[in-house]
Amino acid sequence: PFAAEARRQQVATSAANGGNANEDYFWHGSRTNADNAIKQGGFNASFGGGVIWVSTNSRYSTSFAPHKVMFLVRTTLGHIGTDSTHVGGTSTGHQRKDDRVGGGSDSRYTLSNAQQLYPAYQVGF
């Protein structure tokens, strides 16, 4: 929790963010046995190809939770802008949040810095 709080403060004090860490809650479905590792040590981007996926739609995240465990994750997104460098490339000429992907009925985000995510709640279903 202390690493996530320190990162939230760092993001908020960035000149581009003007004191706003742009923090919200998102869903994360974890693979079998990953939930124990997340509970004990937080998130680790190296297990997901260098990024951690979160979504506004719990239904999307359930498809990644075969053992029926998900997390509601306090997530620091950071700057909202029109052009940004992000995981997977550079966006130009349209508004996006730092690492937003997907669309449709939810917003999905990929974050490469695990310290921007805090597993606030574990949900079994």
Image (cartoon, rainbow, N blue to C red):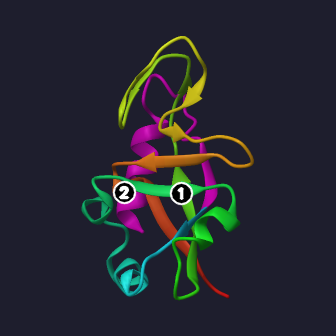
Residue 35, position in %: x, y? 43, 82
Indicate the quadrant containing the N terminus: top left, top right, bottom left or bottom right. bottom left
Residue 19, position in %: x, y? 55, 33
Q: CA distance from mark 2 to mark 1?
A: 14 Å
Q: Amino acid at mark 1?
A: Val
Question: Which residue occupies the foreground of this view, 47 or 111?
Answer: 47
Instruction: State which region is magenta.
Output: 1-26
Left or right: where does residue 71 sit relative to residue 9? right
Residue farthest along the left direction in this orientation: 46
Tell me what residue is drawn at x 52 percent, y 30 percent: 79
Dividing the picture into quadrants, the one containing residue 33 is bottom left
Tag on residue 62?
none
Residue receiving disc 2: 115
Residue receiving disc 1: 54
Residue farthest along the top direction in this orientation: 93
* Residue 20 lies in the magenta stretch: yes
Secondary element at image label 1: strand
Dividing the picture into quadrants, the one containing residue 57 is bottom right
Mark 2 or 1, closer to the camera: 1
Indicate the quadrant containing the C terminus: top left, top right, bottom left or bottom right. bottom right
Secondary element at image label 2: helix
Q: Residues within 10 Å of mark 1 (few under 14, many from 20)?
A: many
